[in-house]
Amino acid sequence: MYEKIAPPTTGSRITFVDGKPIVPDDPIIPFIRGDGIGVDIWPAAQKVIDAAVKAAYDDERKINWFKIYVGDEACEKYGTYQYLPEDSLTAIREYGIAIKGPLTTPIGGGVRSLNVALRQIFDLYACVRPCRYYTGTPSPHLHPEKLDVIIYRENTEDIYLGIEWQQGSEIADKLIHYLNTELIPATPEHGKKRIRLDSGIGIKPISKTGSQRLVRRAIEHALRLPKHKQMVTLVHKGNIMKYTEGAFRDWGYELATTEFREVCVTERESWILSNKEKNPDLSIEENARAIDPGFDAMTTEKRAEIIEEVKTVLDSIWDTHGNRQWKDKVMVNDRIADSIFQQIQTRPDEYSILATMNLNGDYLSDAAAAIVGGLGMGPGANIGDNCAIFEATHGTAPKHAGLDRINPGSLILSGVMMLEYMGWQEAADLIKKGIGGAIANRQVTYDLARLMIPAVDPPLKCSEFAQAIIDHFND
Ligand SMILES: NC(=O)C1=CN([C@@H]2O[C@H](COP(=O)(O)OP(=O)(O)OC[C@H]3O[C@@H](n4cnc5c(N)ncnc54)[C@H](OP(=O)(O)O)[C@@H]3O)[C@@H](O)[C@H]2O)C=CC1
Ligand SMILES: O=C(O)CCC(=O)C(=O)O
Ligand SMILES: [Mg+2]
């Protein structure tokens, strides 16, 4: 079945039932070392994960690692441009859960991004990136501990579909001509707009299916959080792009108020309900005026729409959500993408799960990681219904490769996410404790060392940081 690799001779397969992994005590887990700093951070992460499993379960549980090849290492083993060999895809398909170091986006060879290709091949539609603060981590913010968010980033469409045509290519020219002469003139709202003839063209598809399955996972995750963190914020630029970004928001709300009706309340619904709770005699129109301060300046139609909204909310959910019952539900709200970048800095504690389309989530996950210590502390998971691949938020950081200096924290924390996903919480908790202990004792790599006051000099090496984490398991 495999051309150049062989699975470990001991261990069992992880299987999936209804989108959930069924994990044996001796799972076989494929790993991709990764390019660039992969040579440094993967061995460090593997050592910490193995030590945590051993410390938590002694010999009752053990991961049987299966080395597979993607990226530069794959080209060495399988030949030029063999970045993504079939062997590796078969292994991930067979064993269900994998973990990987970062991969360089190759130039040539017909592959855009190996990282994106893996997410698409296995339909890993939810890119989950938690950003939480470990005490003692240096940060440019006064209160980084107030940020504790989980980004749910759609992982298969938007720019990740990568459908675009180069400026000057035959198809780009044809498409521009067709748009300028047929489609745009046939759409009155586009008026006299025209696409410049020397444009490259990219397509931004946002589907209802893709949006709702992502938001579904985000709401399900919110339901597992403590009450005060049960909140999902739909991040979008719907004020500018109604039918893609705005539709993502609308489909998110639709899902929350249908499939999750009993357990969700939207922000606007909560205003309507609480207005009536504060003043039971409030008329529908007064309530509408209170939720929309610009009410009196609106057109008659718009006012009627808001009055209808208030009436529908009170008629349909007052019994189940009124009288403060909504306070026990998952709060679903939305924020414009540019605004959320300042909100996570100025009012971080008002957010919990941020559900985003692809591009917004890419930017937001690096920015949020910066608040809690930088990319060295930014873990991630790509989750689908039959497979999951765990990896850090950052890339291959080539200038640091092979120097045993980079921070492995991001991949180690991705390992924590993997253990939690497997239900091996005790091992995950040991690692989190170890990371907290190492940082609190100022045992850190260069990235955190240079920001600490006073600076830590010399910083720990990558491998030494891994050992320090293990040494702090039992603090
Ligand atoms: N999922 C993946 O595998 C991803 C792959 N990539 C790919 O990686 C390659 C390099 O991308 P690039 O733009 O340089 O971005 P990177 O994320 O690789 O690195 C940018 C900078 O971020 C900091 N950084 C990254 N990782 C760490 C870490 N573990 N610890 C501490 N600091 C860290 C370093 O900053 P400093 O030097 O200032 O300390 C580094 O120079 C490209 O080919 C890109 O396509 C990019 C993103 C994700
Ligand atoms: O694969 C790449 O080159 C970029 C991926 C990326 O930026 C991400 O996953 O956040
Ligand atoms: Mg990115």
Image (tube, rainbow, N blue to C red):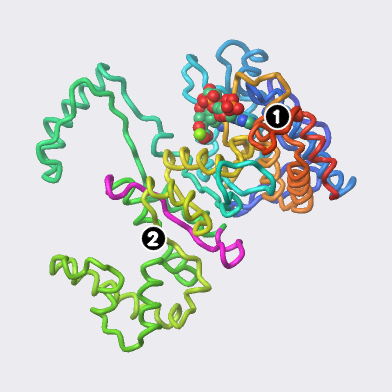
Name the side, left or right, on which 384 lies relative to 38: left
Residue 232 lies in the magenta-colored region = yes
Q: Residue at x 39, y 60 (%)?
A: 253
Looking at numbered disc 2 in the image, what kind of residue is underneath it? Tyr
Residue 117 seen by the camera: no
In magenta, the rendered stretch is 222-242
**Label 1 CB sits under 8 Å from any ligand 1 atom:** yes
Closer to the camera in the image, 424 or 468: 468
Residue 276 lies in the magenta-colored region = no
| Residue 158 image-quadrant placement | top left
- Residue 307's spot in the image, x, y percent? 24, 74
Q: 176 above or below 363?
A: above
Q: Residue at x 53, y 58 (%)?
A: 349
> Which disc is residue 253 wearing?
2
| Residue 74 image-quadrant placement | top right
Disc 1 target residue: 41
Q: Secondary structure at mark 2?
A: helix
Nearer to us: label 2 or label 1? 1
- Residue 182's spot in the image, x, y percent? 12, 34
- The extreme bottom residue here reads 281
Name the side, left or right, on which 352 lies relative to 275: right
Q: Residue at x 59, y 51 (%)?
A: 19
